Image (cartoon, rainbow, N blue to C red):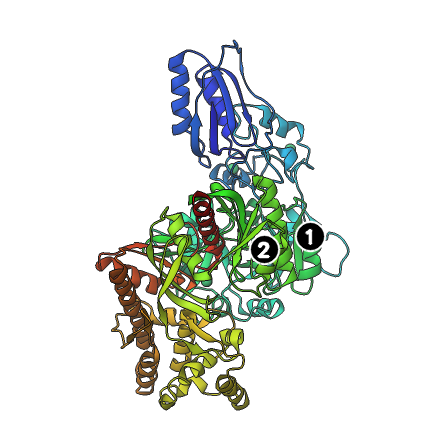
């Protein structure tokens, strides 16, 4: 029989072996490239019991997609064996993500009597690195970066013993034979400490306010004491990360509870085998340094997911900032030499190890909205598990994804392998990461794409990448259409829906900056049925960091409202403002934009909460924090009809915000009223488009829907209007899902071409 799904690197063969022994069946099991193949012989009732148990008792990490049974001739096996893997060139199969330290290994880690006591690389068939060490399939140690570590006699005994929980555990190792840790100090040659002393040295450095670069599972972290303001500020200065929130690592859920409120729907995520960063509501009384997440009422927390992190947190006994080991905007460092070179000016010490990282792998980030997890970033623990697309691609393809928050997707048939988070394609390091990862995916999943899919924007690096792949055909998919098809596809939908895509920026088919679009769309085509009124964006991309510029653009549409907008320009440099006004007047570098992300910026400027932003979305995240859960009434947000499309006019809303602010209203109430206004207008536009087209399903996508308050309000309002609502579940609402949407759309287009 053959079993397909996530069945390699998850302890499946040992499990099959144990079952065969239990039912006294002869035969064998082996990994093949596309599946696990099993042959058993015995009385038919025992074989049946064996097959049932395969399904019901499979180890936790397995995911059985199909189990196919065929009869073969009797061979009179006298025993059951695990036989060497067999490769078949044309087959492919999922690769398991890395898995957090399991409970059994954690007990051994802290058991003084165990031979792996405080061994930072303890793993078993249920846990440890997978994707980050696998170079090719089938999954065997020889095709992983563990191959350089020869198992010692005792490890081999475990590996060969069917009853052992490390039976055929490919990442098996121990203090005698496995990877080593050591501590380095920049400016000093070689290791200053090794083994336990190295981890103790790192803990001591952290406890005395130092910045330590730590090599982890999928790359480096930069760590500091999260309760001490001075080192957190120093880390921000050296890393060039002004205000973006920093993630925190703690050892246990109890430790997380001291930092914030952990809801019943959040706790399972903190202890899951994926262990993402979970954005929770911060406790006012928490010991966290103010600079961890300035201006926000939330904090991203994860629990220690490797044995190395467990030991370190046990030693420091305090929450640690664990931010990606990079200079702002670059990909995280993975190799020791890369880290020494790039992080040498940031870190005071390096905690290194010699298990090579095959795939760069950022921490995943999740936020729970209405008790359902929403991805903000999908990487460690989740990628590269495949998703389905509803219409199979007639030829293999690669979708290269968006410009920012890039992921790519390779497709074979109905199966879409969405890459881990790659980053912003704005520098050569990220481009190299993209290309290395794409090469790895092509090799791991044996996909030779024949079609490249890209964004409409002619100038993006991703566009050049797609063109330079040299494939026979290049297709393009509009950014917001891809947001909508991504949500449709993960829900298996092919019929036309109303798609609401709200984000910061996407290239529109008319050349303008789109970002508040309501589409009537299926996988192949779309019509733009609703949008935000266009306003000039003086400075183009620069406006992302200058919310006052966005406000100025809106003011130019209604110059008589100068007074209501006044707060937006408090303290803004006169010359810079004059220049921006000229850009608008002359139409120079002032593209028209219909961006919901930018409308949040304009609102923050008019409310006086933020005129200059240090990262995209800062103004919006602060407005969401200010609004909290306060009840509020919407302001007027009129809708006009233009050429059959609904146009939302935000000027009266911005004027109302400015006027109420000047009248002394609490800015928190105004932030809440702003959210309610956006939600009400969104619901109304979607309802009108649904009425006009006869559609009854609404798909919500785009980074603006990372805003929990807005997402929940829009979802509830639409459901009250008896519309079915689809929201992103398996991928992020933000641009991380664009490549998957591009792929789903291109596959449908190619299939339609082929059949006509
Ligand atoms: Zn384990
Ligand atoms: Zn060993
Ligand atoms: Fe987007």
Q: Residues within 10 Å of mark 2 (few under 14, many from 20)?
A: many
Q: Nearer the viewer, residue 565 or 579?
A: 579
- Residue furthest to the right: 189
Question: Residue at position x 35%, y 87% from top?
Answer: 564
Name the one closer to the observer, 701 or 732. 701
Q: Which numbered tag is attached to residue 466?
A: 2
Q: Quadrant of residue 561?
A: bottom left
Q: Position of residue 128 (x, y in %)?
A: 55, 41
Looking at marks 1 and 2 on the same chain, the residue that comes earlier in the sequence is marked by 1
Element assignment for label 2 = helix
> Would you identify the image quadrant in which residue 609 lies?
bottom left
Asked if residue 213 lies left or right of residue 405, the reply is right
Question: Which residue does the numbered mark 1 point to in the structure image?
Answer: 336
The label shown at residue 199 is none
Q: CA distance from mark 1 to mark 2?
A: 31 Å
Residue placed most toward the observer, 427 or 572: 427
Residue 662 seen in this snapshot:
yes
């Amino acid at each position: 029989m053959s079993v397909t799904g996530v069945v390699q690197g998850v302890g499946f063969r040992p499990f099959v072996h144990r079952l065969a022994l239990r039912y006294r069946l002869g035969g064998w099991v082996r990994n093949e490239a596309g599946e696990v193949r099993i042959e058993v012989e015995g009385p038919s009732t025992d074989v049946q019991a064996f097959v049932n148990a395969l399904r019901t008792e499979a180890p936790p990490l397995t995911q059985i997609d199909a189990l196919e049974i065929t009869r073969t001739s009797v061979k009179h096996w006298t025993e059951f064996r695990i036989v060497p893997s067999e490769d078949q060139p044309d087959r492919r199969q999922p690769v398991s993500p890395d898995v957090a330290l399991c409970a059994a290994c954690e007990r051994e880690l802290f058991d003084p009597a165990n031979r792996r006591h405080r061994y930072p690389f303890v793993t078993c068939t249920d846990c440890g690195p997978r994707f980050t060490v696998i170079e090719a399939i089938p999954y065997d140690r020889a095709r992983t970066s563990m191959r350089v570590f020869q198992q010692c006699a005792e490890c081999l005994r475990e590996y060969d013993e069917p009853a052992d929980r490390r039976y055929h555990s490919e990442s098996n190792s121990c203090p005698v034979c496995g990877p080593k840790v050591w501590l380095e100090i920049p400016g000093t040659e070689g290791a200053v400490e090794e083994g336990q002393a190295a981890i103790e040295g790192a803990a001591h450095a952290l406890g005395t306010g130092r910045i330590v670069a730590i090599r982890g599972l999928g790359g480096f972290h930069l760590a500091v004491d999260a309760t001490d303001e001075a080192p957190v500020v120093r880390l921000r200065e050296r890393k060039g990360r002004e205000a973006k929130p920093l993630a925190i690592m703690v050892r246990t859920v109890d430790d997380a509870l001291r930092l914030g409120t952990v809801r019943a729907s959040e706790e399972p995520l903190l202890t899951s085998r994926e262990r993402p960063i979970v954005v929770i509501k911060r406790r006012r009384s928490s010991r966290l340094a103010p600079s961890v997440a300035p201006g926000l009422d939330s904090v991203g927390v994860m629990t220690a997911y490797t044995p190395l992190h467990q030991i370190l947190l046990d030693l420091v006994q305090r929450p640690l900032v664990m931010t990606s080991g990079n200079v702002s905007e670059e990909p995280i460092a993975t190799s020791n030499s890369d880290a020494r070179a790039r992080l040498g000016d940031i870190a005071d010490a390096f905690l290194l190890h010699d298990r090579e990282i095959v795939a760069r792998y950022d921490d995943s980030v999740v936020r729970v909205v209405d008790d359902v997890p929403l991805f903000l970033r999908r990487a460690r623990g989740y990628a590269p598990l495949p998703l389905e697309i509803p219409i199979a691609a007639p030829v293999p393809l690669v979708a290269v994804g968006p410009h920012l928050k890039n992921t790519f997707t390779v497709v074979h048939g109905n199966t879409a392998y969405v890459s881990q988070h790659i980053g912003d394609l704005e520098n050569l390091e990220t481009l190299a990461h993209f290309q290395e990862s794409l090469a790895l995916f092509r090799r791991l999943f044996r996909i030779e794409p024949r079609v490249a899919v890209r964004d409409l924007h002619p100038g993006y690096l991703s566009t050049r990448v797609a063109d330079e792949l040299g494939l026979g055909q290049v297709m393009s998919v509009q950014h917001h259409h891809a947001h909508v098809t991504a949500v449709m596809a993960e829900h298996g939908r092919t019929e036309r829906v109303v798609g609401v895509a709200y984000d910061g920026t996407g290239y529109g088919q008319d050349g303008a900056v789109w970002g508040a679009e309501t589409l009537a769309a299926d996988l192949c085509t779309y019509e733009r049925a609703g949008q935000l009124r266009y306003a000039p964006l003086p400075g183009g991309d620069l406006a992302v960091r200058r919310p006052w510029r966005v406000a100025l653009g809106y003011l130019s549409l209604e110059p008589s409202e100068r007074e209501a907008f006044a707060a937006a320009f408090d303290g803004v440099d006169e010359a810079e403002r004059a220049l921006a006004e000229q850009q608008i007047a002359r139409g120079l570098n002032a593209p028209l934009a219909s961006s919901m992300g930018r409308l949040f910026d304009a609102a923050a400027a008019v409310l006086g909460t933020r005129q200059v932003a240090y990262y995209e979305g800062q103004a919006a995240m602060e407005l969401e924090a200010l609004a909290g859960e306060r009840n509020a009434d919407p302001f007027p947000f009129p809708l006009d009809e233009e050429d059959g499309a609904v146009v939302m006019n935000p000027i009266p809303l911005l004027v109302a915000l400015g006027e109420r602010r000047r009248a002394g209203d609490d800015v928190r109430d105004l932030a809440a009223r702003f959210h309610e206004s956006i939600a009400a207008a969104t619901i109304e536009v979607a309802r009108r488009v649904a009425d006009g087209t006869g559609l009854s399903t609404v798909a919500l996508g785009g980074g603006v829907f990372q805003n929990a308050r807005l997402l929940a309000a829009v979802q509830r309002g639409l459901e009250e209007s008896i519309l079915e609502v689809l929201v992103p579940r398996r991928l992020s609402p933000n641009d991380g899902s664009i490549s998957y949407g591009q792929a789903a759309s291109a596959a449908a287009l190619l299939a339609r071409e082929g059949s006509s």
